[in-house]
Image: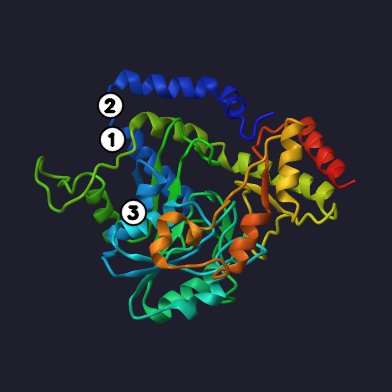
Amino acid sequence: MKFFDLQRQDKLIKKEIDEAIRRVLNSSVFIGGQEVEKFEKEIAKFCRVKYAVSVNSGTDALFLSLKALGVEPGDEIVTTPFTFIATAEVITNLGAKPVFVDINPNTFNINSSKIREVITEKTKGVMPVHLFGQMVDMDEIMKIAKKYKLFVIEDAAQVIGAKIKSKVKSQKSKAAMAGSVGDLGCFSFFPTKNLGAYGDGGMIVTNNKKLADKIRLLKNHGSSPKEKYLNLILGMNSRLDALQAAVLRKKLKYLEEWNKKRAKNALYYNKFLKGVGDIIVPETGLGLTHIFHQYTIRTKYRDQLKKYLEKEGIPAMIYYLIPLHLQPCFKYLNFKKGNFPEAEKAAKEVLSLPIYPELPRKDQNHIVQKIRNFYA
């Protein structure tokens, strides 16, 4: 049994993928071109935003977003300690300081009610991470951002296709898509994401033309789009290649269907795991659509359960074993154990089970039965 079985998905759409790859090879256009341009437009439409700018990774999406918003050494960016290293890494690499806020234990997302406590005159923005497949309480974060004149970058690497309905009664519009609420939204197309490439890739979405244009400059060495070898600003090389764009365009057509299958698998897990031992199954917040990038349970017996499942041939993963404030690379921030108790507790209790769309029901039954046996 595999935690991710990408081959199952590939087999289902192999003819379409092969055709897309062949089309790019025949064109000999490997950097930029129609495949990339069309993919950007399709992502913008999917996310209900005006602009989408492709880059070569989710990490670069975060980095270039911060750079486009003018983050400088000494600035402070509020984020969560319970996430992948890239979130805080990009802040630090610009000379800024990540300021951590503890998580909501029910969702694993940043506790928005605690953000006001850490805002200082150096605070420039907030970077909420939508973890495991559902969004943060963006209403509260946007209120805070407006009051203190902060920018908001959504780290939406794990939630493409997730939605949130505003709690504000006056807002009767459609539910907002992940990435479309803040000033900028950042996605990753790492192969194991809900929308995964055949390599690395990323995307930035926004309704702000000025920011979109600046990011297009930054990702291509600051080069003028009109005059060759004229560099308007200092940038970098962060381009999504045409082969990845072609593959992702084919997969995007199936994303909503795949997300629904993940949610269906999650409901099945919930049905048979809720009330078993001390297991806490994932919660879906009010007004949220959970796309279950991960299906993550909590248990005080996490390490023992993981070891037992491994002996039974069942893969399970821990995201994230060490909160960022306790990572050696952030030792200079002088955090200690106990500073963010909910994040630290989650790191000791979380365990993710296989949840990919093509997961066979017999495999899921086997997983459920073995977990129930563990607690028997």
Q: Which residue is located at x 9 percent, y 45 percent?
A: 230
User: Total label count?
Assistant: 3
Residue 63, numbered circle: 3
Q: Position of residue 138 (x, y in %)?
A: 52, 68
Secondary structure beneath label 3: helix
Secondary structure beneath label 2: loop
The image quadrant where one finds the N terminus is top right
Q: Which residue is nearer to you in this view: 292 or 376? A: 376
Q: Which residue is nearer to you in this view: 355 or 173? A: 355
> Cβ–Cβ below 8 Å for labels 2 and 1?
yes
Separation of residues labelled 3 and 2 (CA atoms): 27 Å
Residue 29, numbered circle: 2
The quarter of the displayed image where residue 9 is located = top right
Question: What amino acid type should be assigned to the residue bearing mark 1?
Answer: Gly
The quarter of the displayed image where residue 278 is located = bottom right
Separation of residues labelled 2 and 1 (CA atoms): 7 Å
